[in-house]
Image (tube, grey):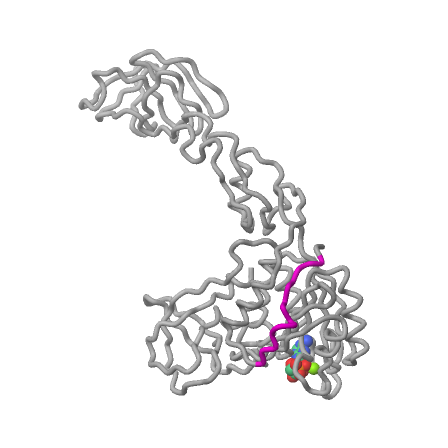
C-alpha cells in the first residue's frame, strides 16, 4: 500500500464537461505507479506485473540438439549434397537427456528429438528417410544430404544475457513458461493493489433475496468485483451502504488508510439522494466530471485522504463501460503496467449513423467475421440500463461525436474479451 496513488490536481481543475480523451488523459496522468514489490513463485505469477526486467543467464537451447527422431551423421566431405545412396554404420544411441560419443566419419547415431548432437556429427536425417539395412546395423539414405539438417543450434531461442521479459509487463502463461525455460524459479513483481468498494442506492437488493416494490438487484457489485478480480486486485468490499451522507462518509473513512483506490457506483450525480460528492469532499477532494460520452456521463475522480477515488455511474452499462474505458487504464498504471491503455481495432459499421450527436457513443456490437474487415452489428437496445447488451456484445464500437456516416464506415472497436481479462 503506497497511500500515494494519486495526484488528481483537484485544486486546479473543476471541469464540468470533458471529452473522453481529456478524461482518460487526466486520469492516467494522475495515476502514480506502485513501487512496492514482492517475490512470487512461477505458479503464483499469472497476471502479476513484473517489477524488473528478466534476463536469461543461459543459452536456450543450451546445446545443439536434434529437431527430429532420426540419425545424426558425420558426413564425409564427398558425401555432402551429392546424389545420395550412402550407407552409414549405426554406432551409438542418444535419447533426450543423455549425451553420445564423438562420431567418426561415415558413422551414424540413432538420435531422438531434443538430444544433444554428438561431437563431429554435422547433420540429422529424419527416421522416415532412412532405410535400415544389414540387420539394422546400418542406414541407407537415397537423397542428397546437406550439412546441418534438423539441428537446432545452441542459443537459437535465447542467448545468455538477453532480456526475455520487460519490467511493467503483465505476465501471461507464455511469459511464465519462458521464465521457466531459462531456469528462473521466482519473479519480482509489484504488490497487488488494494481496492475498496461499496455501492450506494437504497433500492439495491442482494441476489437471492426477494424484491419488494421499487427494488432492484445489485448487479454493479458483481460487475465491479469481477472486473477487479480480472485485474488481480485485492478487494475490500463493504457491499451496499445506506444512502446517507453519514454512511457514505463513514465507508470512505474506513477504507482510506488501507486502500490504494476506492471505487463506488451510483450516487455521483448532484441529486439530493447523491451523497458521494459531499462525502468525498469532506475527507479529500473531488472532481465531478460530465464526460461527453454515452453511456456513462457522470464520473467522479478525486482523493480521500491520499487514496485515489473513482465514482462510477449507477446505471449498469455506464458503470461497466466507464470502468473499462477509464478506471481500467488507471488501475493498470497504478499496478505498474507499462501498457495500460486499451487497444482498439478497425471494423466496418454495419449500420448508418444518421444523426450527428454531441456525445461520443460506445455502441455494444457483435462482429460478423465472414468478411474483411469484420462488420459490426448493433444491439437493438442501447440504453445505459440494458445490461443484456453487454452480455450479448463482442465489444464496444466507438462513434465519434458530431459525425454521420453510411454503412461500411471504418470505426474503432474495443473487444470485451480483451478488456475483461
Ligand atoms: P444513481 O447514479 O445512483 O442515480 O443511479 C442511476 C441508476 O442506476 C438508477 O436507476 C439506479 O437504480 C441504478 N443503479 C445504481 N446502483 C446500481 C447497482 N449497484 N446495481 C444496479 N443498478 C444500479
Ligand atoms: Mg442512487
Locate residue 417, reporting x and y percent. Answer: 51, 63
Vertical side of 125 occupied by 288: above or below = below
Residue 137 or residue 70, whichever sits in front: 70
Locate residue 2, reporting x and y percent. Answer: 70, 55
Q: Residue at x 53, y 59 (%)?
A: 340
Whether residue 206 is visible, yes or no, is: no
Report the magenta residues as a range: 3-16
Vertical side of 19 occupied by 173: above or below = above
Locate residue 251, reporting x and y percent. Answer: 78, 70
Quadrant in which the C terminus is drawn: bottom right
Vertical side of 150 occupied by 318: above or below = below
In the image, farthest residue toward the left: 83
Q: Is-magenta flag for residue 160?
A: no
What secondary structure predominates along the stretch shown in magenta?
loop
Total residue callouts:
0
Locate residue 186, reporting x and y percent. Answer: 62, 39
On the rendering, which quadrant does ligand 1 occupy?
Answer: bottom right
Quadrant in which the N terminus is drawn: bottom right
Vertical side of 254 occupied by 67: above or below = above
Q: Image quarter for residue 331?
A: bottom right
Residue 284 or residue 209, whichever sits in front: 284
In the image, farthest residue toward the front: 12
Horizontal relation, residue 68 to residue 420: left or right: left
Q: Image quarter for residue 86?
A: top left
Horizontal relation, residue 295 to residue 150: left or right: right
Horizontal relation, residue 411 to residue 2: left or right: left
Whether residue 52 is visible, yes or no, is: yes
Residue 80 or residue 131, whichever sits in front: 80
Amino acid at each position: 500500500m503506497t497511500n500515494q496513488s494519486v495526484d488528481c490536481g483537484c485544486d486546479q481543475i473543476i471541469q464540468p464537461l470533458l471529452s473522453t480523451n481529456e478524461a482518460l488523459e487526466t486520469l492516467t496522468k494522475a495515476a502514480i505507479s506502485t513501487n512496492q514489490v514482492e517475490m512470487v513463485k512461477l505458479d503464483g505469477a499469472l497476471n502479476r506485473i513484473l517489477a524488473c526486467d528478466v534476463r536469461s543467464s543461459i543459452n536456450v537451447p543450451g546445446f545443439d540438439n536434434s529437431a527430429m527422431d532420426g540419425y545424426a551423421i558425420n558426413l564425409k566431405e564427398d558425401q555432402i549434397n551429392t546424389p545420395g545412396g550412402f550407407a552409414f554404420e549405426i554406432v551409438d544411441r542418444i535419447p533426450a537427456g543423455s549425451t553420445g560419443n564423438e562420431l567418426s566419419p561415415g558413422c551414424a547415431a540413432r538420435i531422438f528429438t531434443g538430444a544433444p548432437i554428438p561431437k563431429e556429427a554435422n547433420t540429422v536425417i529424419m527416421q522416415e528417410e532412412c532405410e535400415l539395412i544389414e540387420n539394422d546395423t546400418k542406414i541407407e539414405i537415397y537423397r542428397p544430404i546437406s550439412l546441418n539438417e534438423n539441428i537446432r543450434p545452441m542459443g537459437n531461442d535465447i542467448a545468455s544475457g538477453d532480456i526475455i521479459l520487460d519490467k511493467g509487463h503483465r505476465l501471461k502463461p507464455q511469459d511464465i513458461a519462458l521464465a521457466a525455460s531459462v531456469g528462473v524459479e521466482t519473479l519480482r513483481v509489484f504488490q497487488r493493489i488494494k481496492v475498496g468498494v461499496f455501492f450506494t442506492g437504497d433500492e439495491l437488493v442482494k441476489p437471492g433475496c426477494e424484491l419488494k416494490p421499487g427494488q432492484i438487484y445489485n448487479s454493479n457489485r458483481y460487475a465491479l468485483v469481477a472486473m477487479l478480480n480480472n485485474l488481480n486486485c485485492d478487494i475490500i468490499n463493504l457491499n451496499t451502504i445506506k444512502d446517507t451522507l453519514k454512511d457514505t462518509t463513514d465507508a470512505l473513512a474506513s477504507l482510506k488508510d488501507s486502500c490504494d483506490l476506492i471505487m463506488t457506483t451510483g450516487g455521483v450525480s448532484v441529486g439530493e439522494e447523491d451523497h458521494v460528492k459531499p462525502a468525498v469532499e469532506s475527507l479529500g477532494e473531488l472532481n465531478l466530471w460530465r464526460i461527453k460520452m454515452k453511456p456513462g456521463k457522470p464520473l467522479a475522480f478525486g482523493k480521500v485522504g491520499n487514496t485515489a477515488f473513482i465514482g462510477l455511474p449507477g446505471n449498469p452499462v455506464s458503470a461497466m463501460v466507464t470502468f473499462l474505458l477509464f478506471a481500467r487504464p488507471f488501475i493498470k498504471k497504478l499496478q505498474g503496467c507499462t501498457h495500460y491503455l486499451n487497444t482498439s481495432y478497425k471494423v466496418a459499421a454495419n449500420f448508418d449513423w444518421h444523426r450527428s450527436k454531441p456525445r461520443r457513443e460506445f455502441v455494444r456490437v457483435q462482429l460478423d467475421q465472414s468478411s474483411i474487415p469484420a462488420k459490426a452489428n448493433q444491439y437493438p437496445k442501447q440504453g445505459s440500463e440494458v445490461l443484456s447488451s453487454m452480455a450479448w456484445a463482442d465489444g464496444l464500437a466507438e462513434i465519434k461525436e458530431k459525425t454521420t456516416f453510411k454503412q461500411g464506415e471504418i470505426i474503432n472497436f474495443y473487444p470485451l474479451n480483451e478488456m475483461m481479462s
